Image (spheres, rainbow, N blue to C red):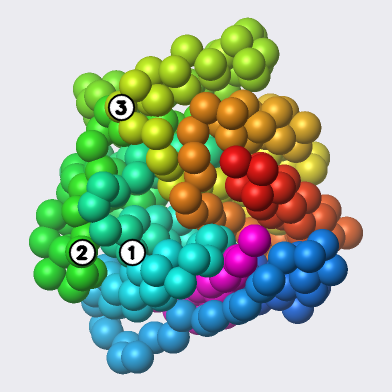
């Protein structure tokens, strides 16, 4: 299998700071060689910021426009796009890289990433990634990101949330986005908790973009994140969920985001990230 690791080392438009250092750390630790040693054909490409803009949202859009072009070419050349992203807003460029039909979205995250400028208590732009991707806000972003189109709400499944802002929760619940929260998964177990929504998603689309914010995992196994939240899913639970997803849907691209090496402890998060990448690619290879 041919894989392209797309390095997007930015945090809110700034390179190699905070979560923007996560993609660099994976590559420094040899994730590309790790995959080559397993027989994959691997190439690495870095997204560059051609021009700095004083407006953060514009800078983010420009980065995603570049990302979309790389994803588009990778798909055309038969490579599986695996995005190593600082922020979760890399979803925008990844999805823009797909021609019609667009894939659905499966989004693992401790947080909703479903705020808008009207609902957010903090103004944090990276808490809006999924909302933008489904057309809830920043409607004119497609003037910068080529081929950017909102993904249908009902083609979107959010998994594992355990920390939502009040108005964000209200907005999410008012949409057709499918949701399986952390409480449901802990109470029912991964298979029983997830299968009904996966079946519902499969009735809408058979191909998905897989997005994993590493803070979905409990801080005991992934402490290197900016917004740790207790009682998260464990790595083996995530891997069970991923295998179930692979049985039901075709994974067409994937992203691993939000790792901050400065906050890691004994490389725990790095090691967890390596395991996730390997698990995802094994599932994709066997589809």
Q: In which quarter of the image is the C terminus?
A: top right
Q: What element carries label 3?
A: loop
Q: Which of marks 3 and 2 is nearer the N terminus?
A: 2
Q: Earlier in the sequence, mark 3 or mark 1?
A: 1
Q: Please, is residue 202 above or below residue 226 in the view?
A: above
Residue at the disc numbered 2: 147
Residue 69 place in picture, x, y as percent? 34, 75
Q: How far apart are marks 1 and 2 (CA)?
A: 7 Å
6 falls in the magenta region? yes
Number of disc labels:
3
**Magenta residue span:** 1-20
Q: In this view, does 54 lie to the left or right of 261?
A: left
Q: Earlier in the sequence, mark 1 or mark 2?
A: 1
Disc on res. 45: none
Disc on res. 97: 1
Q: Distance between the residues labelled 3 and 1?
A: 20 Å
Q: Nearer the viewer, residue 161 or 271?
A: 271
Q: Distance between the residues labelled 3 and 2?
A: 21 Å
Residue 238 place in picture, x, y as percent? 68, 34
Q: What element carries label 1?
A: loop
Q: Are marks 3 and 2 in contact (CB under 8 Å)?
A: no
Residue at the disc numbered 3: 204
Residue 203 place in picture, x, y as percent? 34, 21
Q: Do the residues labelled 1 and 2 touch (CB within 8 Å)?
A: yes
- Which image quadrant is residue 260 in? bottom right
Q: Which residue is drawn at 39% across and 61% down?
A: 94
């Amino acid at each position: 299998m041919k894989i392209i690791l797309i390095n997007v080392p930015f945090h809110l438009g700034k390179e190699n700071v905070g979560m923007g250092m996560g993609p660099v750390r994976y590559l420094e630790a040899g994730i590309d060689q790790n995959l080559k040693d397993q027989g994959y054909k691997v190439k690495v490409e870095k997204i560059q910021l051609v021009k700095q803009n004083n407006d953060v949202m514009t800078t983010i859009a420009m980065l995603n426009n570049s990302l979309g072009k790389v994803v588009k070419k990778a798909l055309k050349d038969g490579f599986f796009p695996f995005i190593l992203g600082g922020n979760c807003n890399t979803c925008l460029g990844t999805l823009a890289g797909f021609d019609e039909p667009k894939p659905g979205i499966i989004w693992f995250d401790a947080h909703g990433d479903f705020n808008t400028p009207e609902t957010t208590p903090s103004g944090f732009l990276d808490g809006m990634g999924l909302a933008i991707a489904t057309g809830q806000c920043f409607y004119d972003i497609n003037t910068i990101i080529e081929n950017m189109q909102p993904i249908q709400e009902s083609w979107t499944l959010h998994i594992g949330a355990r920390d939502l802002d009040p108005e964000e929760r209200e907005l999410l619940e008012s949409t057709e986005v499918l949701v399986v929260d952390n409480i449901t998964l802990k109470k029912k177990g991964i298979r029983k908790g997830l299968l009904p929504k996966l079946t519902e998603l499969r009735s809408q689309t058979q191909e998905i973009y897989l997005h994993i914010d590493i803070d979905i995992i409990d801080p005991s196994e992934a402490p290197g994140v900016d917004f740790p939240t207790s009682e998260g899913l464990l790595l083996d639970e995530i891997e069970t969920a991923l295998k179930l997803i692979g049985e039901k849907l075709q994974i067409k691209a994937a992203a691993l985001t939000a790792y901050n090496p400065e906050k890691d402890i004994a490389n725990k998060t790095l090691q967890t990230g390596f395991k996730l990448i390997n698990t995802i690619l094994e599932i994709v290879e066997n589809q």
